[in-house]
Amino acid sequence: MMLSKVQLTGTIKLDSGLHIGGNDAFAAIGAIDLPVIKDPLTNLPLLPGTSLKGKMRSLLAKAYNEHIAKTPNNDDERIVRLFGATNGGGEDGDLPIQARLIFRDSILSNTTELMESGVESYTEAKFENTIDRVTAGAKPRQIERVIRGSEFEFELIYDVVNPNEVAEDIQTIKDGLKLLELDYLGGSGSRGYGKVHFEDLKAVTVFGDFDASGINEVLGE
């Protein structure tokens, strides 16, 4: 069987404000202390593929690994197949294992809807304090968050390497998305940031002849 590529798409919807940090090294006086990362061309908030990939892998490692893995190379086989490893392949185990998943950056997609609802900005400034336990002094700071109700385009590319492993791979992806919904994306999740959920997930074969109907059945369960 030749290589097939399956595109998984959907929508990431924010159920609470979300912060994934951008570059604050050159922030002007009086500006937001911790800005969110934005697309440099449109200045719209974006969710980096690296953040989605890293969070999903971390959550799956907690769920699947029998013991704490010293390195990602020691993760459960189901995780390594999808996310890759720097070694573990080949007869001697010293070759890298190529990831089967490609995570795309997610761009804010419902700008018109947000503007029509009356919001004036796609982000908000949240004021927080850090309290010094010795002096009881407060250190206020402003954290920028992408507002609740924002929607982002979600896209994964899955390489069909072994047809016999597709069902298990898709279940692993589905578990990762569910774990992310039950956890948080970005920073300050224990303080209510970063609650998300996924909508309208579907799979389409964009290269090769693999039949993606079975994947859609699993995603729809």
Image: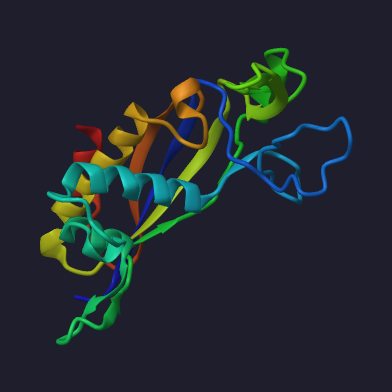
How far from the left and from the top, in percent, is residue 57? Answer: 33, 50
- How many labels sit on residues? 0
- Residue under the point 17% across and 68% down: 162
Q: If the image is split into quadrants, where does the N terminus sit? A: bottom left
Q: Nearer the viewer, residue 82 or 138?
A: 138
- Residue under the point 71% across and 26% down: 141
Q: Nearer the viewer, residue 97 or 216?
A: 97
Q: Is residue 169 above or below residue 151?
A: below
Find residue 24 and report its image quarter: top right
Asked if residue 48 lies left or right of residue 111, the reply is: left
- Residue under the point 24% across and 34% down: 220
Residue 216 appearing in the image: no
Asked if residue 210 lies left or right of residue 120, the reply is: left
Q: Nearer the viewer, residue 148 or 107?
A: 148
Q: Nearer the viewer, residue 72 or 174?
A: 72
Q: Is residue 120 above or below residue 77?
A: above
How far from the left and from the top, in percent, is residue 95? Answer: 27, 82
How far from the left and from the top, in percent, is residue 128? Answer: 65, 20
Q: If the image is split into quadrants, where does the C terminus sit? A: top left
How far from the left and from the top, in percent, is residue 70? Answer: 26, 60
Find residue 210 and report its image quarter: bottom left
Asked if residue 127 lies left or right of residue 60, the reply is: right
